[in-house]
């Protein structure tokens, strides 16, 4: 009897806690993106967890000549499978690994297999290099069963040959233009001599502003390596190595800031990553992401990490400029971005990143990208860092390409 009473009390407490979380706005960014009430979000997150599990079981079964990838829809509670030959559904439905997910499956008739998309994507990368294209992002997006190329009309003169030849490929890629898809490469200029480490005991949270020389970006997450602690951010934030980085609070001025330390690792080719070694004992590291716009839960705790391997998964980011925003993953495979930073005349080429439709802007570079959980709130799973955006899309890199050997993300569990 005591056991039953205890279980009932725990269930009641769980319901009360869940109602409290939804009423205080913890889910507001997710609810706003999904266009649902906050009370609906926990169920959608529960759907997402099961759909991601199903997709991970599905992926090894997808013959690349018959199938054109997969993606989830958490509102419809469906795992969508692109299939060229509808008569081959049994490859999936008859497999024991998919038995728990059969009611979630939806087969979508498409024209392009993954082999076809992969071939065209590789051809586009060759053409882009051959014709010296610049400021483009391209990748396979399963929900449209095609390759999408993001460009700016400002670069049409330089990119015209690439565009003309890209349109001759089969399948013909989708080309999306924006008037300005270089927002992440615009830097806020100021006199760095005004930076002074005056504050004492300042916690540097994921999403906080950080600055060095003539650039401003966002703190990502803290890692340990040996007896040292490092702060991860985007490599293009700050034009060189061996420079001091300082903390900038949300909405704060660029003066009277706390020194964090020197950046000792910087890469802007294949990955966009920088690691700042903490040298100031008054800069405090921890597994926390800033969520200050939410008065009840101004901080999110990093419980662990996960790989963003399922298109349609809803993720969020915290950044200096746009704070916390959410969106779904629209592209993962064979993604590449090549950019020219006119500020320092440096070319960046980033491979194997993730395309999403989150809202991001200049100054958000380096901010942590994470996934909400439907339990143990307000904890989250870290998935990577944001590094570039244009109108309607935001790019981030998964942890698996960012962490160096021996590095361990600092979480509430370690």
Image: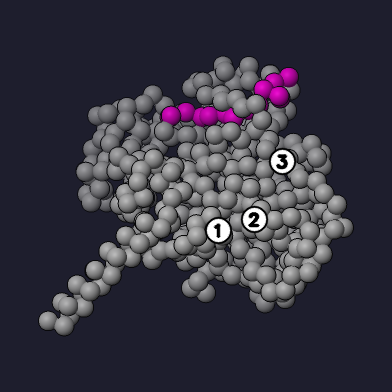
Q: Position of residue 364 (x, y in %)?
A: 63, 48
User: Mark 2 to mark 3: distance in Å?
Assistant: 20 Å
Residue 204 visible (yes or no) = yes
Frontmost of labels 3 and 1 is 1
Left or right of 328? Residue 391 is right
CB atoms of marks 3 and 1 within 8 Å: no
Q: Which residue is mark 3?
A: 185
Q: Secondary structure at mark 3?
A: helix
Residue at image location 30% in from the left, 39% down from the top? 76
Residue at image location 52% in from the left, 24% down from the top? 174
Pointer 3 or 1: first along the chain: 3
Q: Is 122 located above or below residue 97 in the figure?
A: above
> In the orientation shown, which residue stands out farthest toward the right?
193
Residue placed most toward the observer, 213 or 201: 201
Q: Quadrant of the N terminus?
A: bottom left
Of the numbered discs in the image, which one, if any, rests on residue 250? 2
Pointer 2 or 3: first along the chain: 3
Magenta-drawn segment:
144-157
Q: Which residue is mark 1?
A: 292
Frontmost of labels 2 and 3 is 2
Q: Residue 67 lies in what quarter of the image?
A: top left
CB atoms of marks 2 and 3 within 8 Å: no
């Amino acid at each position: 009897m005591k056991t039953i009473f205890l279980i009932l009390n725990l269930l009641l407490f769980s319901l009360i806690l869940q109602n409290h979380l939804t009423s205080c706005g913890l889910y507001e960014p997710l609810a706003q993106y999904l266009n649902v009430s906050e009370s609906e979000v926990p169920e959608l997150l529960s759907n997402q967890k099961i759909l991601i599990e199903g997709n991970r079981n599905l992926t090894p079964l997808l013959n690349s000549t018959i199938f054109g990838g997969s993606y989830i829809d958490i509102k419809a509670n469906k795992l969508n499978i692109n299939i060229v030959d509808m008569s081959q559904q049994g490859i999936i439905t008859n497999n024991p690994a998919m038995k728990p997910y059969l009611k979630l499956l939806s087969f979508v008739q498409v024209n392009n297999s993954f082999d076809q998309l992969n071939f065209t994507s590789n051809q586009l990368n060759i053409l882009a290099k051959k014709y010296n294209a610049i400021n483009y992002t391209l990748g396979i997006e399963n929900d449209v069963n095609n390759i999408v190329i993001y460009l700016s009309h400002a670069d049409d003169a330089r990119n015209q040959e690439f565009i003309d030849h890209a349109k001759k490929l089969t399948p013909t890629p989708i080309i999306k233009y924006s008037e300005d898809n270089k927002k992440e490469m615009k830097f806020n200029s100021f006199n760095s001599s005004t930076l002074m480490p005056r504050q004492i005991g300042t916690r540097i949270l994921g999403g906080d502003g950080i600055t060095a020389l003539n650039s401003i970006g966002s703190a990502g997450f803290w890692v340990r390596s040996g007896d040292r602690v490092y702060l991860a951010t985007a490599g293009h934030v700050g034009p060189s190595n061996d420079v001091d980085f300082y903390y900038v609070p949300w909405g704060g001025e660029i003066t009277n800031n706390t020194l964090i330390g020197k950046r000792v690792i910087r890469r802007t080719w294949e990955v966009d990553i920088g690691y700042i070694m903490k040298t100031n004992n008054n800069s405090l590291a921890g597994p926390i992401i800033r969520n200050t716009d939410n008065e009840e839960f101004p901080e999110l705790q990093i419980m662990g990490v996960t790989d963003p391997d399922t298109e349609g998964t809803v993720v969020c980011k915290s950044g200096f400029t746009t704070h916390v925003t959410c969106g779904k993953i629209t592209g993962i495979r064979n993604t590449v971005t090549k950019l020219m930073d006119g500020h320092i005349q440096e070319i960046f080429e980033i491979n194997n990143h993730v395309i999403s439709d989150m809202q991001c802007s200049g100054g958000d570079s380096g901010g942590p990208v994470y996934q909400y959980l439907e339990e143990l709130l307000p904890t989250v799973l870290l998935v990577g860092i944001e590094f570039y955006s244009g109108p309607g899309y935001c790019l981030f890199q998964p942890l698996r390409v960012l962490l160096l050997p021996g590095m361990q993300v600092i979480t509430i569990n370690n």
